Image (tube, rainbow, N blue to C red):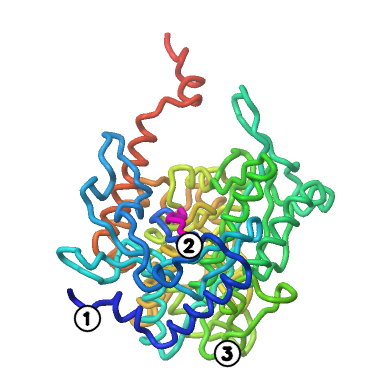
Amino acid sequence: MHTDTDYHRDIEAPGRAELVNRVRQKIDAMGIDYIYYQYISITGRVMGKAAPARHWETQARKGVQTWMGGVANVTPDFKGNLIGFDSNAMECIALPDPDTFCQLPWDKRIARVFCTLYYSLEDYTSPGQYYEHDTRGNLKRFDQQFRADHNGLHLRVGLEPEMVWLTPKDGEVRPYDGITEPFAYHIGQFENAREVWKQVSDYALAMGLDMIQGDCEDAPGQIELNYQFDDALPTCDRMTTYRQICAEVARQRGLIACFMAKPFMGYAANGCHHNCSVWTGGSREMQQLVPGDLPGMEELFHYSKGGVNEFENKDGGWLPTELGHHILGGSLKHIDALTCLGASTVNSYRRFNDYGLWAPIGANWGLQNRSCTIRISSPDRFEFRAVDSMVNPHLFCGALLKAMDDGIKNKIDPGPPETRNVTTVWQAGEPVKLIPLNLHDALEALKRDEVVKSALPGRLYEVFDDYKRDEWTRFLREVTNWDVERYLHCVP
């Protein structure tokens, strides 16, 4: 058996044994009986297995076996063939990252831990090596490489996960209603949803999310709750945790926690703007979010503090530093392919085509210009806006690092900021570059972009492309209410 592998190096990594022991202490002190061993699929779905906590040391040493095709959601294409993997594909190893261990606040006998994936030790081609289809594992490595290549420079991200809380209805054309009216920032409507967002916030604090603000937004049932920005990997892990929390609250209350990009036409969509800055220095510091003993590993409650924001121009004004311009240049050069990963579903493009409802369409950048896909929302950061709440944040942030790296290394100039309203300019027939406005065009843009595709290594790009082109084909093969209403009596 090969022992010079990524898997063996990681299980023998300095400090891992101490982390594993600390998890055991948490298990015993909190009375944990079961553990979810979680990993992330290519679409951001949480996959994995459960195992009794008494086997923790064995699972921490050997990992949990899981089928390779789980990363593609075990999904058949429209012809009935499994996407990316046939039924004879091998197992891979899900090795827990002990520092992500946390008790579930809604069932304190159960905990969860995120895992990194590896090829099995019996694999014919890559035994024990990192499994390239693991988007979370990829982000860990891309982040480490970015820091090494740029003298400790690192990405910090704050997410704005909009979503709607819906009440199911039986026998209706539209089978749901929002739990609030679409009155943005209306405290009375926020009060209507008080018991929901309080429960979400309480669970989130218990799992290491430093909640900072929330409000009622522009669509029926639309609530946005924000947590503190941080380094890319913990921020993306927290986004995954936030979705799981919302899903659990919905189960308890008979609601639907909907992260679908555009559940209502004529109302604002569920965006997930990524607010980005780049830093050197700083340290990981504890945020004591819950009193008493922590219900998870201390590392979950650490956030990056201090350091130097290398994007912000300290001389004043809204234009970023020279380095910041190069980061914008790389992001702008690859904006179409990034949009494919940030807006990754057929439904995502309903958001862009419902003009005038806050969504961007301009393939450009601007200062406080919401019609641009890249907006300088504050002198210390930029906001990538062509991202919705169905995004796989690990995949998107990994690709953003690749685009930023290209901008820095090649000193790409983004050009001057766009000052016009792109939607108005475009509708007037004036020339302006747009982002892709449907999933097919976005997939074609990704196909042409080798830099962004490098964030989907090995066969990951092929699997992602197959998965999403099947989604597009399924869309074209459906007859919808729109078809019937428009064409049923079209002639004579």
Rendered position, 57 above or below 387: below
Residue drawn 21% across and 69% down?
127
Disc marking residue 307: 3
The x and y percentages for residue 273 are 56, 61
Give the CA separation, mark 3 to mark 1: 36 Å
- Pointer 1 residue: 4
| Local secondary structure at mark 2 | helix
Question: What residue type is disc 3 on?
Answer: Gly
Q: Which residues are magenta?
A: 45-52
Residue 49 lies in magenta, yes or no? yes
- Pointer 2 residue: 393
The 10 Å Cα crowd at callout 2, few under 14, some 14 to 19, many 20 or more, is: many
Left or right relative to 484: residue 138: left
Q: Earlier in the sequence, mark 1 or mark 2?
A: 1
The 10 Å Cα crowd at callout 3, few under 14, some 14 to 19, many 20 or more, is: few
The total number of labels drawn is 3
Question: What residue type is disc 1 on?
Answer: Asp
Q: Quadrant of residue 398?
A: bottom left
The x and y percentages for residue 372 are 53, 60
